[in-house]
Amino acid sequence: MSAVMQFNPERRQYNQHLVTELQEERHQVWSLYCKIGEHKPFTCSSHTQSLLNQLSQLLIDYVSLGHFGIYEHLLSGTERRDAVLTAAKDIYPEFSTTTEYVIAFNDKYDDNKHLLNVDCLESDLSSLGENLAKRIGLEDTLCRLILGDLME
């Protein structure tokens, strides 16, 4: 057993809980993202709008967990490993960029904010997928750091 686990097993359990929750939300986002992709060519149907509304809500929950769960936990003062804090701070600008893209996607496609314009939907979904893929790589790095796989 590592010294970290011997010293604070509750912290280790909380870290594992955060990572598991993030992975579960990520899976839900990707599943719905793929489901929407199966409906090409896109139409202005209520079904398409409903799927986009669901995706928007999941995306906001997912990116919020990353920002207000993972990052808040890392930078709250409970994390003492300098290498972890440095890596988290280094990753943050790219991580924030992906969050900004998700929020912009949400603003564009969330229910009743704008008329659904399917002309841009395919390219917007493609860009969303690229941003999510980048975010997943960053999250995986953060998760390894949180779980202590990259100890100082």
Image: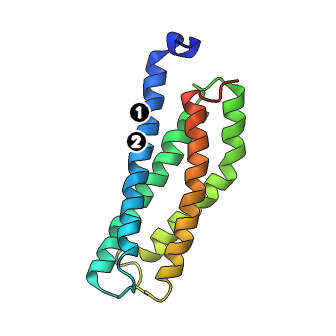
Q: What label sits on residue 17 in the rendered view?
A: 1
Q: How far across and how far down the image is residue 62, in percent?
A: 44, 53
Q: Residues within 10 Å of mark 2 (few under 14, many from 20)?
A: some
Of residues 83 and 109, the one nearer the viewer is 83
What is the secondary structure assignment of the residue under circle 2? helix
Image quadrant where one finds the C terminus:
top right
Tell me which residue sits at (56%, 72%) in the image. Answer: 127
Q: Viewed as shown, does residue 28 lie left or right of 6?
A: left
Q: How far across and how far down the image is residue 123, in percent?
A: 54, 80
Colour scheme of this structure image? rainbow
Disc 1 residue type (three-letter): His
| Residue 146 found in image quarter | top right
Q: How far across and how far down the image is residue 120, in percent?
A: 50, 85
Of residues 53 and 39, the one nearer the viewer is 39
Q: Is residue 2 above or below residue 130?
A: above
Tell me which residue sits at (68%, 47%) in the image. Answer: 91
Of residues 117 and 43, the one nearer the viewer is 43
Q: What label sits on residue 95 in the rendered view?
A: none
Q: Viewed as shown, does residue 12 lie left or right of 92?
A: left
Residue pointed to by mark 2: 21
Q: CA distance from mark 1 to mark 2?
A: 6 Å
Residue lying furthest left: 46
Q: Are discs 1 and 2 less than 8 Å apart at CB? A: yes
Tell me which residue sits at (62%, 53%) in the image. Answer: 95
Q: Residues within 10 Å of mark 1 (few under 14, many from 20)?
A: few
What is the secondary structure assignment of the residue under circle 1? helix
Q: Is residue 22 above or below residue 106?
A: above
Disc 2 residue type (three-letter): Glu
Q: Is residue 104 above or below residue 48?
A: above
Q: How far across and how far down the image is residue 98, in percent?
A: 59, 60
Of residues 142 and 75, the one nearer the viewer is 142
Count of numbered circles in the view: 2
